Image (spheres, rainbow, N blue to C red):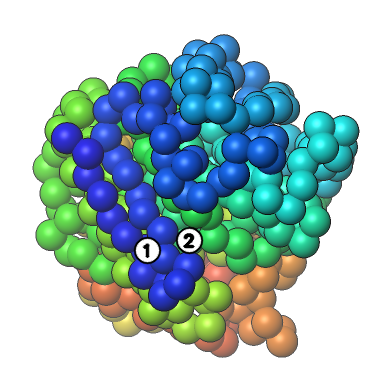
Amino acid sequence: MVRQITVDLGERSYPIYIGSGLLKDVGQRCLEAGFPLRSPLLVVSDSEVAPRYLHVLEASLREHGYTVVTHIIPAGEASKSLAVYEEVITTAIQAGLDRSSAVLALGGGVVGDLAGYVAATYMRGIGFMQIPTTILAHDSSVGGKVAVNHPLAKNMIGAFYQPSMVLYDIDTLLTLPARQVSSGLAEVVKHGLILDKEFAYWCREHAAELLELNVEALGYALERGCAIKAAVIGNDEREQGQRAILNLGHTIGHAIEAVGGYGVFLHGEAIAIGMAGSALLAAKLGRDASIYEDTVSMLTALGLPVRLPAETSEDELMEAMMHDKKFKEGRMTFIVPDTIGSVSIVNDVQQSTVREVIAQLKKEESPW
């Protein structure tokens, strides 16, 4: 069964395909996307994904007549840097990629973000296809946000650049380590928390199946998560309004990643703590305390952290949040839940209140 979703952006609309065994169809899908055979394709992957799946993708592309060039980056967030970006651009130049060429991202969110930024900037923009291999990348591969990190702030150097297609082979998820599975599911349940109450509770009720990588449950969860994000993107591609709700948990989460040097917490783990923080903030702003309790129960059911290490520096986290793109004109902006399945964009959040939230996240006991 192949599930299909469309990201509706008028003439730039593109499909998302979700199913088993889709890697072997990449060559045909590239033809459907309009990538010409005369121009080389650049496949960007990482040191963990490439040994498992690159040969299948390359065989499909060559079988359909494409010239394939590959660039393998070290696995991990540290590769989402300007230095590695320059190395990939060098490979593209040396391989003779032209304006009709395309970049294929085979990997998780790091590979997708980096390869997408290469596609967006090489010769002012060439073709791009996302082939995510992690659960987490169901979020990052959809919507056209591509970027590399600066040591002071995550995703500070980037662009909006939509892919021609997203091809999601569920089989590539079945070898993920447990921690990566939980990390990815943070972004899945996030979509329910912001816009779909029933789906959020469904994730909690089916947590065991999701953690066990039950194909049917996983396929539904990915389809629903992608569909929610696609609907938001269709209404606000460049985050001028509603799209900002997709940042639930990210203000604190990105700061956690930056302070940890992008190596202590996985992205989904940091975002989970950030979503717990947003739920705490909601209570401080007068929302019902049950929002926090339900949010935490959903996250912990999926094996995710909801607390900060006791040694975390509040000052360093606050400083990192000041560098966040959502920090404007001295104001702190947060996505705050009103209920499970509905959120608001709240500006002018007091820094003292944010400090209280961070302090609470460092405590082991429940705040209620």
The vertical placement of 279 against 269, above or below, is below
Q: Nearer the viewer, residue 93 or 286?
A: 93
What residue is shown at x 71% (from left), y 69% (from top)? 322
Q: Which mark is residue 7?
A: 1
Q: Which mark is residue 330?
A: none
Question: The disc labelled 2 sits on which kind of residue?
Answer: Gly
- Residue 204: percent from left, percent from top: 18, 45
Count of picture labels: 2
User: Does residue 20 appear to the left or right of 34 in the view shown?
Assistant: left
Q: Which secondary structure lies at badge 2?
A: loop
* Disc 2 from disc 1: Cα separation: 8 Å
What residue is shown at x 32% (from left), y 60% (from top)? 6
- Residue 181: percent from left, percent from top: 38, 30
Question: The disc labelled 1 sits on which kind of residue?
Answer: Val
- Residue 196: percent from left, percent from top: 21, 64
Image quarter of the N terminus = top left
Asked whether residue 135 appears in the rendered view, the answer is no
Q: Decide: marks 2, 1 in contact (CB < 8 A)? A: yes
What residue is shown at x 82% (from left), y 37% (from top)? 96
Q: Nearer the viewer, residue 89 or 170?
A: 89
Q: Residues within 10 Å of mark 1 (few under 14, many from 20)?
A: many
Quarter where residue 101 is shown? top right
Image quarter of the C terminus = bottom left
Q: Nearer the viewer, residue 308 or 207?
A: 207
Q: Nearer the viewer, mark 2 or mark 1?
A: 1
Q: Earlier in the sequence, mark 2 or mark 1?
A: 1
Q: Which secondary structure lies at badge 1?
A: strand
Q: Which mark is residue 143?
A: 2
The vertical placement of 293 against 222, above or below, is below
Quarter where residue 252 is shown? bottom right
- Residue 64: percent from left, percent from top: 49, 27
